[in-house]
Amino acid sequence: MTSAESTSNAPAPESKGGVVISVDAMGGDRGPAAVVAGIAQSAEKNPDIRFIVHGPRTELERLIGRRRDLAARCDIRDAQGVVSMEDKPSQVLRKGEGTSMWSTVESVRKGEATVAVSCGNTGALMALSMLRLRKLPGVNRPAIACLWPSRNPQGFNVMLDVGADIRADAQDLLTYALMGASYARNGLGLARPRVGLLNVGTEEHKGRAELKQAHELIGGTADAGNFEYIGFVEGGDLPSSRVDVIVTDGFTGNVALKTGEGTAKLVGDFLKEAFGNSVMSKFAALLAMTSLKRLQKRIDPRRVNGGVFLGLNGTVVKSHGSADAMGVSSAIKLAFQLAQSGFHDRLAARVAQSLTVENTVHLEEVANKGAS
Amino acid sequence: MTSAESTSNAPAPESKGGVVISVDAMGGDRGPAAVVAGIAQSAEKNPDIRFIVHGPRTELERLIGRRRDLAARCDIRDAQGVVSMEDKPSQVLRKGEGTSMWSTVESVRKGEATVAVSCGNTGALMALSMLRLRKLPGVNRPAIACLWPSRNPQGFNVMLDVGADIRADAQDLLTYALMGASYARNGLGLARPRVGLLNVGTEEHKGRAELKQAHELIGGTADAGNFEYIGFVEGGDLPSSRVDVIVTDGFTGNVALKTGEGTAKLVGDFLKEAFGNSVMSKFAALLAMTSLKRLQKRIDPRRVNGGVFLGLNGTVVKSHGSADAMGVSSAIKLAFQLAQSGFHDRLAARVAQSLTVENTVHLEEVANKGAS
């Protein structure tokens, strides 16, 4: 093996202490250079992370070799195939074995790395993750959770599902509530997250049948699941300080996520135009630079880059396809936090426990119906 | 009758020329004073509008009497009952006959006014409108269309349904496409609007079954319906310049609308905070005032106030519950434009024509299936 490590005489990363993250260098819109630049940023900030990097060996060796001290912390896994944004998930499942994405997920499956990170095709990454990692016992539909800029002290709310599946029944929504709460406890450090169910109104009689059913199920599981259930929330509550975790199906969640991103971008562009309008306003923009930069930082999507796949035997972080070095570095940071907190085992335990609770709730319901 | 008109010796508005708008003075968050202030603004700007105003006579006479020359242009219809934001639509249908909202819709049903405007409870207003105005032939589910700030030259895109119904099948989505295109032609002056169908991806294989079916139906009706069909669009495309009309079900549309509003408000609040941060940035904000005001105007929800109910025998404009005088005035302006353009008759003709087209498409489909 002529990997970067062997030439630098460093041992493979998994043999050292610290957290190992498996990173797909290919499939993003900006190519492997942006991914390696992101790895380098993360490596510099955090000496406890080591990397397994997947892609064409020659190209990766060249990119990694250019960065000071990086080669010693990266184990390169040669994979010549690349999953493109246009590939259908079904094709990737059949023919994807030689791709960097497959190899990235495989490192988590084998236990060489704790969390996988990829900027590639979301549908393919979810399909591959489900095939290779398998669903956790008790999970019917895995979910993708995203972080949403909010008015809460922690700065972000969690929303799921934002696109793993286009459907969710009441039982799935309950699982999302449990997994989302677990993510908020471990990712955002909230002892008892407040969970809301996304609907078109906050009144109990509103919305689709599965939402009314989920409303009952989630409410009945809140205490055992160590979260607070605040009932229905609306689209306007996504950045609200009265909720931490917003539960919805993957169709609605995906539309909401992209609508929010699109709106923030529209307002930002209008703002730029407004400040470019006159000499006076350009001068004002100069004066307000610090404040504007602070604002930009608060709503910069690169800072909250990373959808987390929940409900599998292993954690996968999906970075934005268009992520630059800073975006990739954010996704790696998130992966590191989740790896370090032992998030995956906690979540699995929570879902397993809820299976028992649910059965109890269900039995009580049946008993009550019999009595009435 | 001791109405404001009889005391001022003015004839009833319907007997004069110009457009008559029926306005519900009650049910908004800010009460009748804000609504009358909005009517006064509209009356001042546009000498061709006359009003039928519904609510408690004594209060309305007092509010209208205070405004110079307004009484002569308003016909007050006494209605003591008020539909509150908490009332369930089903209750309002049973017991709502003495309310200002009922009376407001009734004026359109009787042909005294061309368009109705209300700031009240959306669900109740839609239920009442369906009961009294009835659905247009060929429309199974009416829709609420909203205007969305966009990068297009016209400044806005149309989205529907944003909450009339929580469900929509393929046939409903086709009707929304036809009605939305008609609205864009008459409300925004676009000769051949571009219609997109909201989905979680732009690839043809993505999304729910009814979306794939609607994709075929809408594509097949575009030429006859005098619009261009651009296929699937995503949440990020709502403000896009590549589409004019976005078609979706009322659940997704409502979540998207409220998410967009919530995001714009979040960014706006963050911006205010940013400019309040230091003496320097406060000074900068002063310098940039004109630019910031221009921006605010561009994304001010009050400027695009008014969801339009489409698919009924009569046009109803739903203003934001929290609308102030400017918001009410915007909703009235929209109502006036639609009344003047003869929008309602054009839309009805378009839907009626499509019934023939659809049948043709359907027959062709059957024929093709028989052949294959």
Image (cartoon, coloured by chain):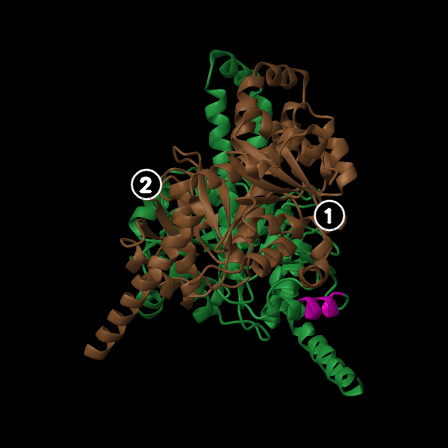
Chain colours: A green, B brown
Predominant SS along the magenta part = helix
Characterize the local packing of mark 1: few (<14), some (14-19) or many (20 or more) Cα atoms within 10 angstroms: many
Establish whether labels 1 and 2 are both on one chain.
Answer: yes
The span shown in magenta is A215-222
Q: Residue furthest right?
A: A371
Across and down, in percent, residue A328 comes to: 47, 45
Across and down, in percent, residue B175 comes to: 41, 58
Identify residue for label 1. Answer: B79
Tell me how far mark 1 sits from mark 2, CA to CA: 41 Å
Across and down, in percent, residue A305 comes to: 51, 46
Asked if residue B140 lies left or right of residue A188, the reply is left
**Which quadrant is home to the C terminus of chain A?**
bottom right
Residue shown at the point (30%, 58%) measured from the top left: B221
Chain to which mark 2 belongs: B
Q: Amino acid at mark 1?
A: Ala
Identify residue for label 2. Answer: B191
Residue shown at the point (68%, 66%) measured from the top left: A215
Q: Nearer the viewer, residue A252 or A34?
A: A252
